[in-house]
Amino acid sequence: MNLSALHKARYTYQPKLPAILQAPADSITASLGEPTTSVGDQAAVKAIFAHQYGKPIISFRQGSNPAMTRRLTVGVILSGGQAPGGHNVIAGLFDGLKKGNPASSLLGFRGGPGGLTDDQSVALDAATIDQYRNTGGFDIIGSGRTKIETPEQFAKAAGVARDRKLDAVVVIGGDDSNTNAALLAEYFAAHDVPCAVIGVPKTIDGDLKNEYIEASFGFDTATKTYSELIGNIERDAASARKYWHFIKLMGRSASHIALECALQCQPNVCLISEEVEQRRMTLAGLCDEICAAIVTRSAKGLDFGVVLIPEGLIEFIPEFKDLISALNDYLAHQAAAYAALTDDDTRLAFVAKGLSVNLASLYANLPRDIRLQLIMDRDPHGNVQVSRIETEKLIVSIVEKRLAELKKQGDYKGKFSSQTHFFGYEGRCAFPSNFDADYCYALGMSAWALIAGGYSGYLSSVRQLDQSAAHWQAGGIPLTMMMNIERRHGSDKPVIKKALVELEGKPFQTFAAARAVWAVETSYRFPGAIQYYGPSEVCDQPTETLKLEKR
Ligand code: FBP
């Protein structure tokens, strides 16, 4: 293979581990906390997870524990969207298994959770793992979004676990995938399948976090990748002085990615969906705020700028939230009739009939492309595919109209030319930053320690991430602790609660205190490319979000 110089160099990078995971296997033991409760809907969550509910938080510490050296057979699944560092989770899990007992083995289930139910697996040996250390992507075994939900799927997964004599399955995934992991753990416990299920917090979106899960892996690398690109665009905008760039950033519902990139790059405007919802802003209202920045800058001779738009914005604008929720319910309940329709015009007419008068009028006034994007297939977990809705173009079209009106009234004399961008997939498979390479390797090894310790229904956790890796705390957080009940596919389901941007939190407050100046001045900051080698203050820094949250 003709590998790039960086690719070869990354093979020699040795991820840093928390001190406890550097210890010999038989001297790692667990401290157990108090019984836990779910974040919401306790009675309903407890009823669904009768065998899992209430487990204690686990922290690893030094102590004699010969049981950790038992021979294990473990299966691993990569689930959902790619996130930098997934390969290092598998490497950490593999190295942990071999440290515990050289006869232990690791199977990779191909193509996501469907690989488990269909028994599509590959043995992962040292030579294979070595090819993927410290690299981006999920291509070692591939990923997928299959949701294991029918009794047949659960029974098949149990059959595969029994046939392959699996001691555990590790699910590397986001909130939806880890919800699946919890359901699988419950099913195995209820049906006496002697196989543990352990989750690992993955997602570039940064929304799988709480007091105990300080960050999901991949967020660090993805936001650094986007920030490099945004900084480059800012410099281009300030050089050419003729374009307003509207950049939609991936991240699904939460605006963590947009906020982190704003803290890194100091753009003129960054919309935060959670604030839009709290202020009950309309689409027209938020476009007016963008126009205000454009008009003020134009009066200063600055007919250029950069606007960041979180991918999930549309779901947070109150009028659209109602529309999307009505569309979700209608499409779920009319699935058969809708599936029989053969062209877009009939689909649009069919959907419009199912909406209330107000929502039908909102829907009818949207550009046709957006109307079609809003009714595209939901993903297997019931999510609207926001990456495919061109919110940035919708906003530009409204801003253009509004500026034309302002010009007519004599309130705006500038020239407005726009460029739109969507940064999403570009950031999901970059070589993991040193932070993600270390964090993921530690998460993988912590997952092994949970399995070797005999635990199930846990999310592997590594805490105190603002400190150096040696001081990180490894352990496990019960999956049920993060659950509440939400409406999906037209019915109520247990799901891991998404962490949205907290408007009282330090990251948002820091942004809010600075943004008025950024809107009218040109305060751009250029983070540059991720550095893997060099001084620690350049190549080992966590995100601004993490630093501010831990301050
Ligand atoms: P996960 O929640 O599975 O980590 O996926 C994250 C994500 O990258 C979102 O930011 C984005 O909206 C979505 O995946 C895109 O999905 P797909 O890869 O199926 O197009």
Image: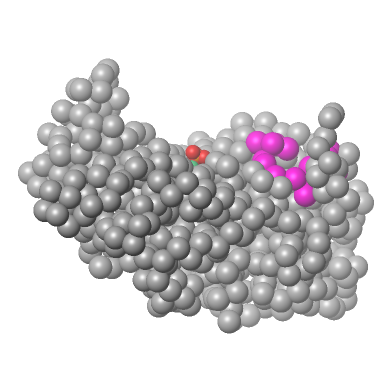
Residue 139: in magenta span: yes
For this orientation, the residue located farthest to the front is 301
Residue 290 visible? The answer is: no
Residue ID at (21%, 49%) = 403
Residue ID at (12%, 48%) = 408
Left or right of 90? Residue 250 is left
Left or right of 383? Residue 50 is right
**Front position in the image: 472 or 513:** 513
Residue 190: in magenta span: no
Q: Magenta region's main secondary structure?
A: loop
**Front position in the image: 314 or 270:** 270
Left or right of 297? Residue 113 is right
For this orientation, the residue located farthest to the left is 357
**Front position in the image: 55 or 372:** 372
x then y, percent, for residue 513: 41, 77
Residue ID at (36%, 43%) = 418
**Front position in the image: 424 or 498:** 424
Q: Which residues are magenta?
A: 128-142
Answer above or below: position of 407 versus 50.
above
Q: Quadrant of the N terminus?
A: top right
Q: How is the image coloured?
A: one colour
x then y, percent, for residue 374: 29, 38
x then y, percent, for residue 314: 31, 50
Answer above or below: position of 64 versus 306.
below
Answer above or below: position of 371 versus 266.
above
Residue 520 visible? The answer is: yes
